[in-house]
Amino acid sequence: MKIIHGIFVLLITVILATASLVQAQNYRINMKTPAVQLYESMLLFAEMRKYVQIEKSLPYLKEVFNSEKENFKVDLQKDIEEAIKSGDQAIVVSSIRKAIFYDIKDIFHAVNNQFDNEPRNTVTSWLKMANLDYKILSPYIKRNSLDGSKRIDANFTRLLGSMSNEKSNLQEINKIMNDIIDELASAGKF
């Protein structure tokens, strides 16, 4: 009886874990405003010192922040709120850039976990979202490391190109995603 109970508990755990992984990116599809547009607006508001507008954007990113908190143990909403309280424009901009970096990491995390379970076009759309996030960071990354920026651009091209190849595998995709994250972390000082 204990074995049957143990197997049942394990089965329920696996089902719930799988459901939460699938749900992990479904919230992105259901967002009224894509995260990339919110981040872009938040950076513009930061440059204009319109911090109230940034605060108004944060609730729309709640599920994104929750996912990043769960996956990476970072509280990016709190970081942005504290940056706003500081009143220092550079700190506010830096906290938003950090949130964009973690958004890319979160998308890559979902790709890693769902590569074999999701249709290829879904995974490709997630990677395109990550690429759009990077496009927002790109000018900043270029200022810090032109060579790093070129490598990231090339890796995103490889990554998206590999998704059109039916023979691409998760190991190859992960290598490229890890290279992108490492390069971003180094050039962006996240």
Image (cartoon, rainbow, N blue to C red):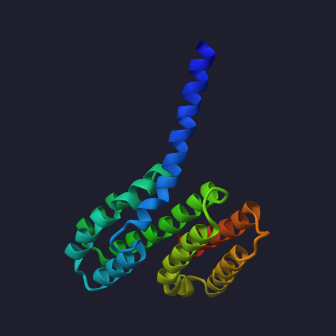
Residue at 33% x, 59% y: name it.
62
Extreme residue in the left direction: 52
Question: How far from the left and from the top, in percent, is residue 46?
Answer: 30, 80
Residue at point 47%, 82% (across, down)? 136
- Which of the 4 quarters of the picture holds residue 66? bottom left
Q: Which residue is situated farthest in the right direction here?
A: 167
Estimate the x, y position of residue 170 in percent, counting from the top left: 72, 61
Q: Is residue 136 above or below residue 30?
A: below
- In this rendering, does residue 90 appear at all? no
Quarter of the figure with residue 127? bottom right
**At 23% across and 66% down in the image, what residue appears?**
85
Which of the pair 55/25 is nearer the observer? 25
Instruction: Give the quarter of the figure containing the N terminus.
Output: top right
Q: Is residue 189 left or right of residue 172?
A: left
- In the displayed structure, 188 sits above or below 5; it is below
Question: In terms of depth relative to the viewer, which is nearer, 75 or 14?
Answer: 14
Residue furthest top as drawn: 1
State whether residue 123 appears in this view: yes
The number of numbered discs placed on residues in the rendered structure image is 0
Instruction: Choose between 137 and 85: the one closer to the eye.
Output: 137
- Residue at 24% from the left image edge and 81% from the top image edge: 49
Q: Position of residue 69 (x, y in %)?
A: 43, 53
